[in-house]
Each structure stands twice: as C-alpha cells, then as structure tokens.
Image (cartoon, rainbow, N blue to C red):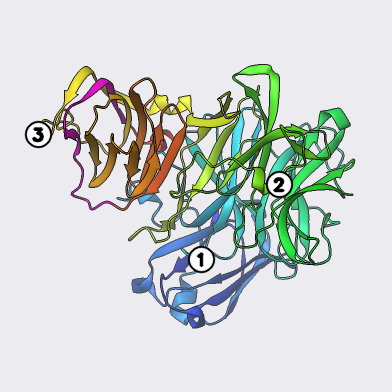
Amino acid sequence: MEKSFTITDEYLVLPVRNGGDEDDECRLRLVVDGRTILDYGIRFATGPGDVDWYAFFSLARFRGKQARMSADNITERGFELVRQADAIPGADTFYTERLRPQFHFTSRTGWLNDPNGLIWYRGEYHLFYQHNPTALPWGNMTWGHAVSRDLVHWSEQPKALFPDAATGTCFSGAAFIDHRNQLGRKSGAEDVIVAFYLRTKIGLCLAYSNDRGRTFTDFEHNPVLNHDGARIDTPRPFWHGPTGRWVAPTYDFFTNGRGQLRRCVGFYSSDNLTDWRFESRVEQDGWGDELCGCVDFFQLPLDGDSERLMWVMILIDGSYIVGEFDGSTFLTLAGKPATTDDRIRSLVIQGDYYATMTWHNMPGLRHVQITWMRSRGFYPGMPFNQQMTAPSELSLHSTGEGPRLRMLPIAELAALRTRSHEWTDLALHATDNPLAAISADLLDLEAELQVAAGTVTCLQMRGFSITYDADPESLCSCGTEARLSPIDGVVRLRILLDRASIEVYANDGRVYIPRVIFPEHAHRPISITCTGGTTTATRLRVHELESSWSIC
C-alpha cells in the first residue's frame, strides 16, 4: 500500500503489534523529495484493537515537503492508522508505567542496547545509543539520542542515525569534537560533532553535525576505514596531543601465527580523519568471547594525582588493563605490548552489564561511565525494552597488587533525594526491622556494617535479597555472588533501588553488582535483619528519591 502527503505535523506515528513471527513483519519506507528517509521492518497492528504501542519518528525538519510512504504485508485498516500527529499517542503515560525506571535512562518506546557517542559539549551531555524504534526485540539498528545538563535529568531527542538499504544499519561507535575542522564541514559558529561508527554493509563511517548533535549528515566519502576479511567495528577515536594526530582503538581481527582468525583491539591513526593507518593491536588468542568489542580507552590520574596519569583500557565485560601509550602501542606497566591475557578481573560482578562507555571531552580529568543494563527478557506490558545503568564515576587507586579501578554513583544523583532516614550504632537482629516504615519506590541506601563471625545480614528490597554472609565473606545480590572482605572490620554498601533494577556498590566501589528486576506489584516493603548473631550498623542512611523525569 502507498500514499502521498505533505508533511505538516511533528511526528509520523506507526501502530505496533508485539509478538508474531517473521512472516508478520512489514517493510515501511518513507521517501521525502526523492530520498529514502526511513526504511524499517515493523509488525503493524491490523486495526485499532490490535495496537500495543505506537512507534514514532520526528518529521519537523521536513515540514512543507512532499512525502511518499509505502508498506507491504499490511492490512488496509492497519495502514489507515499510520498518520502524522503533533503528539505521540500514549505520551501522557510515559515514565509513569509500573516497571518504567525512574532514574535510569530508557527510550520512550522500543528497544535499547549499547551506549554510543557519549560526549560533553558546551554544557550538554549527549547519550547516543543502539535503538530499535519499531519493535521491542533487537533490530533495525538506529542511533537514539538524549541530552542532559547533569547526567540525571534526560531529554530524549529525535533519532540521529538511520538504517539504509544500500549501506546497512548503524552499529556502535563514538563521537568527538572536530576542533580543528579537519573534516572541513564546519558551517557556522558551532564546532562540528563527528560520529565514527560502523555501517554494516560498507565499514567504518563518519557523520557530522553542525547543530550541537541534533541532526547528522553522513560523510559523502564513506567508508573511511575498512580492510579485507572480517570487519572493523566500534571505533573510539581521540586526539593524541603528544603525536599530534587522531588515534582510534577499534574492535578488529587479525590472523595469528597459526593461520587462525582472532579478535583484537586494533589501533589506527590519522592526520586528517579520513585516511587511517594501522599502528598496533592488543591481541586476543581465544575465539569464544567478544572481549575486544566496545572497547573504551582513556587516561585516569592515579590516586587523584594529575601528574600521574595512566592509560586504562576497559573491555566489554568490564575487565581492564592499566598501562602506558605512546600514540602507537599500548604497553603494560611492565613495558611489554599488552594482550588480553594482561587484563585485570572486572570489579563488575556479572550481573546485567555490557558494553561500557565513558563520556568524552568532560571538563577536567573526570570520567563517568554508563552501561547497557542487559536483561534477557522483556519488561512485561511495557512499550520499551532494556535500560542503562546509573552513571558511575571511575577512579584509579594504588594497591599492593598494582593500580586498580573503583566506581561509585555520580554525586549528581543526590539531587533526587527528598527525605532521608539515619541511624548510628544500630544493632541488627532477626526480628526487628528498623526500615519497616519506609515504603518509597526509589531509594539510595548507604550502610557501614560491623559484621560478627557467623552472621548473615540481609536486606530485602521489593521481594529481592541482598545478603552478606560473614563466614565465607560473601556478598550476594539477587542471586549474583561476589567475594568481599571487610576493610578494618567494616563492610560498606551503597545500594540504588529503582522500579526495575538494584545496583550494589560495595567497599567504596571495589565491587559492583547490577541486576535487572521485575518485582511483583505487592512487593514494596524493605527490611534489614541479621541472623546468627548481631551485626552493628555503625551508620545507616536511607534516602527516598524522586523521579528524574519529574522536571523533563
């Protein structure tokens, strides 16, 4: 079916039906002034009673232009529901749904996965992300986009990068500021924001924005980096001052000495952003995982000392390597070329965590990361699927084993606190629950626990358990377990509770356990108890939080 129209409204809205099989999928195309703007697979509703939710695309930049829309494998009644509108159907319930995270980022509708293109520019934090706008499962890879001034309150923007039948879908990548206008695409007062990402059919590509990241144009000479054999993926470019050139660690492949194709982090450099040459690699000898995908690479001060900067490479599972970088080769602190065998075990205990990335270009030496909080299932009854973790600040510390990462929730989250409860030197027992009167949806809990031998301290949150067992020195959150020894006799916990997640930071950020949860509606009370003896909470603070969407 096909129809032509003049674009007059803010959005194109599409009626979506969940479920079905591949034979139910339609192909929707929107052509504006002879150019294909949208090309998406979608399971259309067959009529008004069959609509689960509405997908939407911004048409504002095309107002007044002529458009032609076509769709195959669709009913006449379903096609009639595809329309222009100045409001998104169902928008009045966004962020109020029972399982909608209230201070973790989600897309208003559709699927979300890897964070992409994280960048700070002129007071705004940009969060781009892998996105399927027209379905709840993975697919139709598009770059979604949101901006924030404080990393807490987000405003979703029109989608930024779109699939194309000829060049492919838009996989992961990064963004940077072309301060020197080396791409030659600056057209006004704003510096150019450049996205470097994989288009699946042609290779690594550039797209540029002259309006602070609101819209992007694909570079006409794409792709700018590719090679024979397996594709290069997920670049993370940055300007390397000492050598005066751009460097991009990428998800790459190589053939080892035994003729076997293996994964690696490949370093490439460029003087002009369009011509890239191979420099070195961080090799991975195994084939069975994707450690080198979505790699992050940056400098952190050791113990907060800006004169002692070290390079940190974080791999896809959160494991990492600390070393030195000369603009060409990444070396361990022992001076040898790094391989994935040199990685330090992640402080993240899996967990629901995948494809971490930090914000590029932040003021000072601060590094804040966010990660796809991966769930294997759907959020029951919701028009969205998947969420991001809470943003966490990374720091590097000296230990007897060498430099080690820690991570804690960003300080900005404290702005959501509305009411606090505090206890000191509180003896915890099996039957008394000091938290019985607290029933808030959203919590930020801080605890310092002196644990006695033989005790098991248990926090219950909306039907899920976080326990510390003193004898094996074991922390367990929602079934995920980690070894955790007291420090000077104290176990420190920081716990963030949202409607669909629990994140536990332990011992000042030495251990992190993120878990997605789908609580039953009745499970609202929280409790803290101890069996096998007495645990003393030398300090216990529980902060009730408001939704981060309340002012957006």
Residue flagged by tag 3: what amino acid is it? Thr
Q: Are marks 1 and 2 in contact (CB under 8 Å)?
A: no
Point out the image quarter for the N terminus.
Answer: bottom right
The magenta stretch spans residue 526: yes
> Vertically, is 160 above or below 168?
above
Q: CA distance from mark 1 to mark 3?
A: 59 Å
- Residue 148 image position (x, y, % from top left): 54, 34
**Comparing labels 1 and 3, the label whose residue is closer to the camera:** 3
**At which x and y percent is residue 7?**
61, 60
Residue 83 is marked as 1
Q: To which residue does mark 2 refer?
A: 339
Structural distance between the alpha carbons of marks 1 and 2:
53 Å
Q: Which residues are magenta?
A: 519-545
Let me know if residue 178 appears in the view: no
Name the secondary structure under disc 2.
Answer: loop
Magenta stretch prevailing secondary structure: strand
Mark 1 residue element? strand
Task: Give the numbered dot on residue 431.
Answer: 3
Q: Residue 42 appears at what percent x and percent y?
A: 52, 71
Label disc, if present, on residue 172 of the rendered structure: none
Disc 2 crowd, CA 10 A, few/some/many (<14, 14-19, 20+): some
> Horizontal and vertical percent for residue 411?
47, 24
N-term mark: 1 or 3: 1
